Amino acid sequence: MSENLVSGKTSLKGPKTSAKKQKGENKAKESSKGKRTQLGKKDKIDLSMASIGHPEIFPLVFTTKTQEIFNCRVDEDVTEENCFKLIKKEDIIQDLKTRATISDFHPIKKVVLEYPGEELLVVFDAKFQYGQNFYFVASEEAKENLLKPPETAEEKEEEKEEENREETLEVHPYKPPVHKPWVSLGSEKEVEEESVKDTITKIKYMISRVRRKFGAPITFTDKNASHVKDSYVECTSYQDKTYSIKMLEKNVGIQMVPKLREASTQTKWTYPKNAATQYFPRQLSSEEKEESLSSEKLKEFLTSVHLRMEIALQQNEIMNAFFDDWKALAEDESSSGGKPDVYLKAYQSFTDLRHLKDRTISWVCWHPTIYGIIAVSAGERLSYEEQVNLSDKSLLQQSVILFWSFFDPIHPQLMLECPEDIYCFQFSPSDPNIIAGGCINGQVILWDISQHEEKLQNAKTVADGIEITAVNMDNRMGATFENRAETCVQLVTCSPDGSVLFWDIPATKLPEQPSSEKVKEEETFYVPPDVPDTSKHPDVCWKPLIKINLRESDTNIEYGPIRISLKELHYHSKPSEKVQSLNALEVPAKESPYTEMSIPSSKNLKVLENISTDFFVGTEDGEIVYSDWEMEIHSDSAKPVSQKHAQKYIIHTETINTLQRSPFFKDIILSVGGRNFAIWREGVTNGPILQSSCSAGRYTAGQWSLTRPGVFFIGRDDGNIDIWDILKKTHEPSHLQNISKSTITFISPWTASPNQHFLAVSDDLGVLHVWEICQPLSHPSSNEDANVLDYFEREVKYLKYCEQEFQEYQELQAKTELKWSWRHRGRKQV
Amino acid sequence: GIPIRTTLDNSTTVQYAGLLQQLTMKARSTVRDIDPQNDLTFLRIRSKKHEIMVAPDKEYLLIVIQNPCE
């Protein structure tokens, strides 16, 4: 039954069921318990409205079927006003029988059966007062009340209404609460539920003890429970392996917090910026400069400062602090290293078939400025006797000076024609376009090749050059030597006729047409007649400035100088002074019968004192004469005495073919002649510093090396060149090299560039060989200068020593002779 | 520095004057930094090619350029 009731048809408390139509009406009592269902209660379920104080009212749901049966259809038989319906009990019972459980009265079946009366009141509850649309009144009294009170209620209501209408302002009278019978609304159940009741009857034990046993003295003792076995039961904890909780999933909360870190940077903003400043230096105006120059302060400053400056300058003068000893040491090492095999490397050789056939080269000269140009003078290969009889010989070929260029070994660049064979020639040091040459017949010739200079420089082949000659002297020219005088305007020639001539080269350029002149000269030993060629040329007088006749002071024998060497004189005076001549002698040399002087305009002349006027002369006979050419007036005879203190040395046996000053030392002279050579020092009058022993062959040419102070080259008649290095060996040449087959006629070294050193060697066959000097031979060692100088000094000392010895020896000799004679006398006497 | 009197050409003089003035100032300040009682009396610069000698003063500067090879 409870389950049926649980189906929730009724609920008193709480929300009403939303069913609009309450279906059916049950006779069975419906106990409205609300939500609370009975728990385990088997008691009759009270459907009545006891819970709300109306135990006789049973709300019912009448289905339409039931309504039709009992004629209490809603809104037809039973309305709101007329809500009472009396139904006979028998009908209900019958309905119950027929419809059994589906009858609406089923829930209140018992109530109906117990109903005393005949007619049951069913009330249509339109307002759902009691939860359902109908309710059944179970008791007669209630029925009566309902039927009647509504009347009374109606009446009362009507009365009230009337009263109300009548007494609207009347205060409601206070009605004390009227006791009403307890209407159970179903809360008894809950109360019962909450109440505690014994479910099981309690077991009662009664324990009794004899009274006298109470209160007996008792003694308690302590006992440790662990000592006694089984005194206690322990329930230890153990790990139950069967029971384990595996953490399969774990919820873990994670919070991500970034690490806070403070960092800071400070940057400097550098950006490229174009900035330019243009400035010019401050300068004082000239007045300001004047002012400051003359100020006192400046003077004081200068006085105070100049002392310090002088000290510093002096220190610099005393010692060269820049000298690198280490470097100098290294150079010495390298020079004493291994000897190369070849000192001279063949570079080029020149020969010309046309002009140089059967001819010999008498002189070689390098062009001072243009690289690679050599000039050679060709001459007849004549023997000594033939040269004497030169006048009879007609020249088969035109004598020429050929210019060779390195770049064209076959064709000569330029050819200078000359009336006679040139014996020697030289380029003017200051103007390389002027060449002075001396002929065999005694003429001095000047060429001006300025118009061909360009051709020479371009080294094109020139068919031939034409030349201009200026004819002058009637001597057979020995050597020409150009003197420097700031601009080179002087020429010195010497000739075997015993004269040394100074010529003045015209300062202005020669005109296109040469000027030449015949000069009358007295006949000397070797004077050949003038060559008629000279008559072609106009008569322009070119006379030597000074003429010096070399005569031996005592014997009045003339010298035949063939080579001359003058001291090179350097002037530091500015050209503005225009020193045109070496010196102008105060003594008018006109007086001398041997001199023909044409003194240039005197205003240009200045007397330069302190000039060395000494010179060396090598003669045909092999003598070396050292004298000076300064004319002095002999105090007694008022005649100029040409030379004094002439010194003569006979060392060489044959003609001296070379007399040359060392390019490094101004007072060292090399002389080569015959079978030996000698080195002289100016001022050392005893003899040569070095004299070679007689060699097998003849020495035919000699030259100092231009780059090394202690090296010179000697050419021989067998075509060999001896290279002598004084520092290495003095008794024999340090190196021999064969150049050609025939006699070497001339050697000329040349430094074309710091790395290129050439040696031009000419031979008797007319071939010019140009050799390159290898580095060891061309590069001086660091102290070579000083070493060579040292060597010479030593030699000089040695000479002096020797002389001393000799003198002492002589004295000794004299003494011993005296003694001897004494003794002799003594003997005689006795 | 402003050149007053010179034996060289203008541009070189100006250059030398300017540069050496600065160098002298620097040298003097160096000397005085080391010892405040001290002062620069003479400055010599030796190079491969020349030697430059500078004599400083309060207002003036004397510069000599010398070729050291003897």
Image (cartoon, coloured by chain):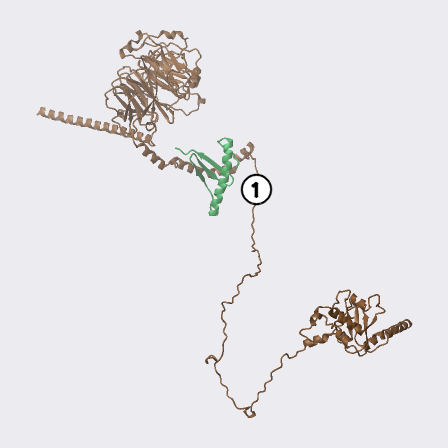
For image coordinates 57% across by 59% down, the residue present is A254
Residue A458 falls in which quadrant of the image? top left
In x, y percent, where is residue A464? 40, 12
Q: Is residue A479 visible?
A: no
Which sits in the foreground, B25 or B62? B25
List the residue tagged with mark 1: A271
Residue A335 falls in which quadrant of the image? top left
Mark 1 falls on what kind of element? loop
Residue A283 falls in which quadrant of the image? top right
Q: Quadrant of the C terminus of chain A?
A: top left
As shown in the figure, which amino acid type bears the numbered disc 1?
Tyr
For image coordinates 83% across by 74% down, the residue present is A146
Horizontally, residue A672 falls left or right of residue A454, namely left
Relative to B33, say whether A597 is above or below: above
In x, y percent, where is residue B43? 45, 40
Which sits in the foreground, B65 or A303? B65
Binning the other alpha carbons within 10 Å of mark 1 as few (below 14), some (14 to 19) or many (20 upward) gives: few
The chain ID associated with circle 1 is A
In x, y percent, where is residue A374? 37, 19
Relative to A99, say whether A706 is above or below: above
Chain A colour is brown
Horizontally, residue B17 falls left or right of residue A637, namely right
Chain B colour is green
In x, y percent, where is residue A76? 84, 66
Q: Is residue A231 visible?
A: yes
Q: Quadrant of the N terminus of chain A?
A: bottom right
Horizontally, residue A805 falls left or right of residue A147, namely left
